[in-house]
Amino acid sequence: MARINTPVWLTLAATIFVAAHASALETLPGEPPVEDRQQALQEKVAPSDERLASGRVVAVDRAGSRITLEYRPIPQLFLDGGTRIFHVGDPASLKGLGPGDKVRFEVERDGRSYTITRLLNSN
């Protein structure tokens, strides 16, 4: 008798599997179509101004074009959060900055050193 019911159970399981898979592909009202979903997620996750990291000024060395920052993790460069001395590409961007100021910055890796290419005061 178990052999007779086996095809019924297999058919039921396959139907549930197909129905669940089809409903996962269904879009809700206001949701982008399936083809545009990946692009929409990328736009939400990484807007263009989100490339800037954030931190707090610890010290400024205008003569040496360097700044010491306490910063949050920068996953793009595999940098854990902490305190580090950064070289600044444009020394004029250090004007008006002092210890305790909040900043947003863009940094590039150059071998073993890091250079700030863009520095904005967030105060």
Image (cartoon, rainbow, N blue to C red):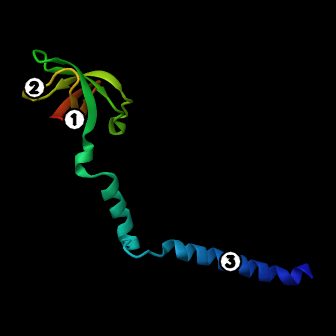
Query: Which sits in the foreground, 30 or 115?
Result: 30
Mark 1 and mark 2 lie on one chain; the one further toward the N terminus is 2
Q: Does 75 sit left or right of 2 as displayed?
A: left
Crowdedness of circle 2 by 10 Å Cα count: few (<14), some, many (20+)? Answer: few
Vertical placement of residue 27 versus 108, above or below: below
What residue is at 82 percent from the left and 79 percent from the top? 6
* Nearer mark to the viewer, of 1 and 2: 2
Give whichever of 29, 40 is nearer the camera.
Answer: 29
Q: Is residue 29 above or below residue 120?
A: below
Q: Residue furthest right?
A: 1
Amino acid carrying label 3: it is Ala
Disc 1 residue crowd, few under 14, some 14–19, many 20+, Cα 10 Å:
some
Residue under label 1: 105
Looking at marks 1 and 3 on the same chain, the residue that comes earlier in the sequence is marked by 3
Residue holding disc 3: 14
Task: Please give the name of the residue rendered at 21% of the width and 35% of the height, measured from the top-left corner.
Answer: 105
Q: Secondary structure at mark 2?
A: loop
Residue type marked 1: Phe
